[in-house]
């Protein structure tokens, strides 16, 4: 019997060790977008290494490897760049583990001081990816209006907003405002545990060149926030958000105050 067991052990396949193949990914900016010259641009991405894990760093270049910016991270990462030369700009990145440097990948080509308008076939929303900064369930329990300043790159309508909730899960009121504080839409909805979509009864027409604020009112605080998020312009077709895009106002009403470039996790929905 002992001999048989030993033979079975020797014949059993050795468990495979996952090979290192670290890769970097990128969310905003969107492929082919036009971005302003000499303005800070927010670049957000992720990195992975399959089942092996162990990512420790991401390197980013915008000059085809002549210079690199390194970011210590195990996954999510963000970086602010300031394009200073008109024309196409390609963002490349590579990820590291302790033993392996992954391949250089061309993640996005954007147009600095350009007029390109990437196609958009249907409804879309502003997807705010995570960064290396933590998402915090704020213990603030005061009534507050939390908002996001946006512009769009084409005519269309705001048809709703996705909200990410914190500890407060009761009823909220979503709103859209013009840049001067004129209320354009208002929609009260029951609460939800994690997050919810709020659809406006009447879509709100929006035009390029005008700034809008999408917000929601919570009577008992309990929201989520991420500080040091909107440190550059975020450009994701068809949306643009400026530096310090996250705004708030205690007691409710048109929000204009800012705090440490915070993100309050509102994601407007656009219909061309």
Image (cartoon, rainbow, N blue to C red):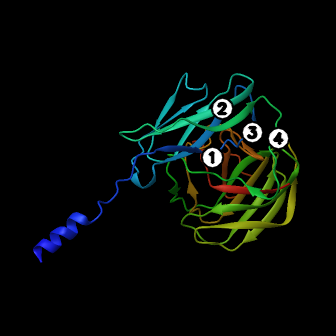
The quadrant where residue 36 appears: top right
Q: Earlier in the sequence, mark 4 or mark 1?
A: 1
Q: Secondary structure at mark 2?
A: strand
On the image, the x and y values in percent for residue 92 come to: 59, 34
Q: Residues within 10 Å of mark 3 (few under 14, many from 20)?
A: many
Q: Earlier in the sequence, mark 3 or mark 4?
A: 3
Measured Cα–Cα span from mark 4 to mark 2 = 17 Å
Task: Give me the residue at 82% from left, 36% from top.
Answer: 116
Q: Earlier in the sequence, mark 2 or mark 1?
A: 1
Measured Cα–Cα span from mark 3 to mark 4 = 7 Å
Identify the residue position indicated by label 2 in the image: 90
Q: Residues within 10 Å of mark 1 (few under 14, many from 20)?
A: some
> 240 left or right of 92?
right
Q: Secondary structure at mark 4?
A: loop
> 54 left or right of 41?
left
Up/down of 269 relative to 88, above or below: below
Q: Earlier in the sequence, mark 3 or mark 1?
A: 1
Residue 237, labelled with which disc?
none
Measured Cα–Cα span from mark 3 to mark 2 = 10 Å
Identify the residue position indicated by label 1 in the image: 27
Identify the residue position indicated by label 4 in the image: 117
Asked whether the beta carbons under mark 2 and mark 1 sit within 8 Å of each other, the answer is no
Q: Residues within 10 Å of mark 2 (few under 14, many from 20)?
A: some
Residue 32, labelled with which disc?
3
Asked whether the beta carbons under mark 3 and mark 4 sit within 8 Å of each other, the answer is no
Asked whether the beta carbons under mark 4 and mark 1 sit within 8 Å of each other, the answer is no
**In this view, the mark in front (4 or 2):** 2
Measured Cα–Cα span from mark 4 to mark 1 = 17 Å
Q: Secondary structure at mark 3?
A: loop
Asked whether the beta carbons under mark 3 and mark 1 sit within 8 Å of each other, the answer is no
On the image, the x and y values in percent for residue 13 come to: 30, 63
Q: Residues within 10 Å of mark 4 (few under 14, many from 20)?
A: few
């Amino acid at each position: 019997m002992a001999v048989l067991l030993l033979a079975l052990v020797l014949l059993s396949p050795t468990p495979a060790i996952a090979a290192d193949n670290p890769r970097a990914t990128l969310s905003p900016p969107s492929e082919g977008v036009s971005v302003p010259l000499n303005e800070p641009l927010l670049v957000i991405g992720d990195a992975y290494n399959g089942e092996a894990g162990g990512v420790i760093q991401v390197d980013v270049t915008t000059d085809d490897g002549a210079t690199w910016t390194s970011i210590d991270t195990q996954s999510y990462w963000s970086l602010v760049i300031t394009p200073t030369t008109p024309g196409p700009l390609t963002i490349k990145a590579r990820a590291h583990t302790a033993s392996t440097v992954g391949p250089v990948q061309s993640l996005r080509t954007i147009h600095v001081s350009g007029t390109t308008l990437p196609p958009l076939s249907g409804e879309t929303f502003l997807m705010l990816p995570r960064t290396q900064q933590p998402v915090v369930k704020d213990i603030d329990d005061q009534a507050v209006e939390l908002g996001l300043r946006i512009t769009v790159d084409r005519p269309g309508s705001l048809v709703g907003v996705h909200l990410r909730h914190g500890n407060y899960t009761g009823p909220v009121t979503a709103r859209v405002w013009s840049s001067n504080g004129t209320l354009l839409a208002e929609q009260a909805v029951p609460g939800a545990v994690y997050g919810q979509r709020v659809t406006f009864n009447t879509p709100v027409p929006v035009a390029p060149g005008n700034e809008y604020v999408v917000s929601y009112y919570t009577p008992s605080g309990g929201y989520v926030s991420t500080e040091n998020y909107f440190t550059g312009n975020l450009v994701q077709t068809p949306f643009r958000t400026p530096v310090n895009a996250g705004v708030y106002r205690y007691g409710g009403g048109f929000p204009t105050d800012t705090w440490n470039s915070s993100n309050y996790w509102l994601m407007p929905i656009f219909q061309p």
